[in-house]
Image (cartoon, rainbow, N blue to C red):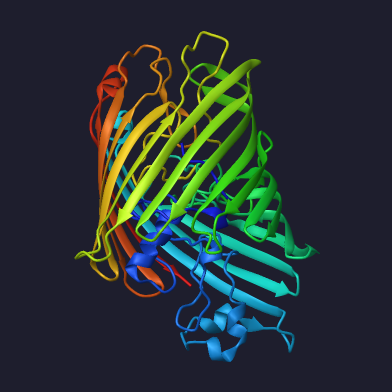
Amino acid sequence: MKGSAPASARPISPVNALHGMTTLAAQYRCAQSLGAAALALYAAVPAAAQTTDASRAPTLTIERYDEDWAVLADPAKRTGHWTEGAKYIPLGDDDGAYLTTGIEARSRYEGYRNTNWGASPDQGYVWHRLMPYADLHVGKVRLFAQPILSTISGADAPKRPVDTTGIDVTQAFGEVEIDVAKDTVLKVAAGRRLLSLGAGRFIDTRYGPGVPLPFDGVQATANRGRSQVTLLYLRPVSTMPGNFNDRTESDRSAWGAYATRWFGSDRAQGVDVYYLGYRDRHAVFDQGLGREVAHTIGTRLFGDTGRWYWNVEGVLQRGSFAGMPVRAWGAGGEVGRRFPALPWKPEVALLSDVISGDRNPNDHVLGTFNPMFPRGKYFGALTPVGPRNLIHLRPSTTVHPAANVALSLTGVAYWRESKGDGIYNIPGFLVRSGRDASARFIGKQLELAIAWQATRELNLSTQLSTFAPGAFIRETGPAKSIRMLGAAANFRF
């Protein structure tokens, strides 16, 4: 299964970008192919790959604090674009003191038929959010703040944490940069921030749904040449309807260390080695409920040559659950190929993961892999199944009928890795128990998506998805085909 890396270590994998907030690296490649100078919807670029030349502004990121606009201190580097006045605001005569501002305004419609394969009512709603930000730099010190104003319209069901949080604080942290040795820089940050490690498998911003997922904690990152090491301790923030009432969770926390070594100065290829710890005082599995402590150790090889790209990873997870040992694992990989010389510049990719499940709910070992805080839209715009007890195979293709348009088609097939375990949703809640079922096949999914970079700031996209149930769904309850239509308008600068 694909693991996690610091933002600057993300591989470049294009074809998932239009599938409803899949890997951030994949999303950036879509932005490149659309020819967007700033951002395509849901796009992010590794910090090492950001450009600051006169012809192209620094690429916008999902987290926003990774952007570096100091280049605009030189009037010769400005292009005259209307947003530049907000991206670099000098404070006095000192070039080391400046303010960066920006905003995201997004509305996204989602309509579902046969929700949960017919076990839940049909629904349709629109998420709205407004997220301005301010980034103050004074020498080696910075202060970053990003409030959020969010609402949901058209929804009759109780509001979930991903739906709305009223007016609240998404990010507010301070950071100091320290030159600890020759060619070695240490950045220490504390406060609330959005954070995505690698492909968003373990810790992610939850960018796709209405409300992102912030974390409170501390992070220290040391960079020396082609090497980077990050230490962190985090607690997720519980986002709730109402104004200024989001609070740090006390039941869950994560900590760890992540090391990356790039093979070249362009940071296009490299290897990661990491350890992530996790604690949940009220974890829920098909086996039961209890306190879980998980220790995840993994390594990843990633690379991008411009035409070929790959990401191969293996993960082991050990720990305890309700006094019993945890023995879980994951493995997988992605490989893709671009054909820039052909008409419409097609791209093809194949991704496959095997994520362990529990063998026997009545024994004294838990085998279900815990992904902690994964992406909000994990396998596509329609994602009724989460990354636990799962085998999945996903071929996809993307074409570009115009320089600013991308059209993609993705098919996915899902199986249970273990017949002794159920299936789970993205947050980790049990969707269907596996105790009384013998079938392994969960179902198959087809998704068509299109994105149009209308301007440098405005992206319009839509997705049409269907999920046909397999034998396991038919054995365990209602088994109608889920249908989903999504559409979004995202304005960012």
**Quarter location, residue 341:** bottom left
Query: Which residue is farthest left?
Result: 343
Depicted 197 relative to depicted 143: above or below = above
Q: Position of residue 121 (x, y in %)?
A: 31, 35
**Quarter location, residue 127:** bottom left
Q: Position of residue 281 (x, y in %)?
A: 65, 27
Depicted 144 relative to depicted 235: above or below = below
Q: Is residue 427 left or right of residue 413?
A: right
Q: Is residue 430 left or right of residue 440?
A: right
Q: Nearer the viewer, residue 6 or 158?
A: 6
Please say whether residue 91 is visible from this viewpoint. Answer: yes
Please say whether residue 373 is visible from this viewpoint. Answer: no
Q: Position of residue 366 (x, y in %)?
A: 55, 18
Q: Nearer the viewer, residue 156 or 111?
A: 111
Residue at coordinates 47% horizontally, 11% vertically from top-left? 360
Query: Which residue is farthest right?
Result: 180
Q: Is residue 112 left or right of residue 22?
A: left
Depicted 288 relative to depicted 386: above or below = above
Q: Nearer the viewer, residue 64 or 5?
A: 5
Q: Position of residue 418 (x, y in %)?
A: 41, 19
